[in-house]
Image (spheres, grey):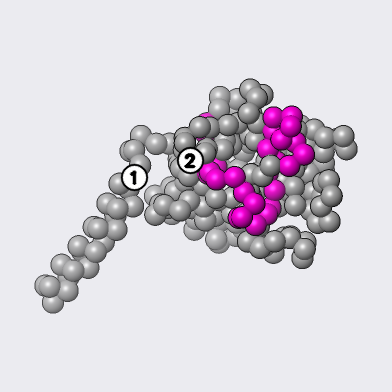
Amino acid sequence: MKKSTFTWFALFFLVAITTRLPYSATAQAVLDTDGVPLVNGGKYYILPFNKGGGGIGLVQTGTDTCPLTIAQSPDEDSDGIPVTISSPNKIFVIKQRHPLELKFSDTDLPSCTPTPAKWNVVEDELSAEGFSSIKVTNDSEKEPGWFNIRSIRVAPKSYKLVFRSPDNATENIGFYIDNNKTRRVVVTKNKIFPLVVQFKSAATGKLKKILGSSAAA
């Protein structure tokens, strides 16, 4: 009995320390609009802080026959499409500067959209202007790198998204307003003001309460 108890304790201790090893204890958790830390693998609406539109979703651009381009909804009353925010690392709470993968909830997408609906940075017609589009595409078409969340002193619980390449170069994510007045979400090599966002939990009812109490613990 003592051996079994020791084995379970050792396993718990090993999981606990390996969960925290890669990250500094001073790293700050990213908070949603309710002040609850973001959970790894949780679903959130990404809401631009600026006025003039709603949350982040998908639009059809260029020669695409399906909505594949990440953009702000023109409807101020729309929260957009829920985004699953996840890190490949063994963590429960999302903190600033963690490497992140972003993908839309498959249940809220047109049938023509690739699945999983990952956000990928791609080269397209905007490249000549110093921008890279962010689209839902196959991984074979993407530029290598990760998304990060960084704090920005604009308002409480407000953040900016950045794209980090394998050589650790970081680039801001901002808006590009095209000829159709669509606010496309892009990576820029120019120094433009970053897109300031907040994260609204897409969880509801008991699940939201459980996630909130677990993350805050």
Residue 130: x and y, percent?
A: 69, 29
Residue 201 among magenta residues:
no
- Identify whether 200 is placed above or below 183: below
Question: Which residue does the image show at 12% across and 73% down from the upper left?
Answer: 3
Question: Which residue does the image show at 84% across and 56% down from the upper left?
Answer: 65
Q: Are marks 1 and 2 in contact (CB under 8 Å)?
A: no
Tell me if I can see residue 60 in this picture: yes
Residue 102: x and y, percent?
A: 59, 50
Tell me if I can see residue 53 in this picture: no
**Which residue is at the far left?**
2
| Circle 1: element type | loop
Crowd tier of the residue under label 2, counting other residues whose Cα lies within 10 Å: few below 14, some 14–19, many 20 or above: few
Judging depth in this view, the residue of 153 and 120 nearest the camera is: 120
Query: Bounds of the magenta span?
Result: 124-151
Question: Which residue does the image show at 41% across and 52% down from the upper left?
Answer: 89
Q: To which quarter of the image does residue 22 belong?
A: top left
Check residue 22 in the rendering and tell me which mark sits there, or answer none. Answer: 1
214 relative to 105 in the view: left or right: left
- Identify whether 166 is placed above or below 6: above
Distance (Cα) linking label 1 and label 2: 17 Å
Judging depth in this view, the residue of 181 and 146 nearest the camera is: 146
Amino acid type of the residue that numbered disc 2 sits on in the rendered structure? Pro
Q: Nearer the viewer, mark 1 or mark 2?
A: 2
Amino acid type of the residue that numbered disc 1 sits on in the rendered structure? Pro
40 relative to 197 in the view: left or right: left
Residue 176: x and y, percent?
A: 75, 33
Judging depth in this view, the residue of 138 and 111 nearest the camera is: 138
Residue 131: x and y, percent?
A: 69, 33
Residue 132 among magenta residues:
yes
Q: Which residue is mark 2?
A: 166
169 relative to 1 in the view: left or right: right
Counting the numbered discs, the total is: 2
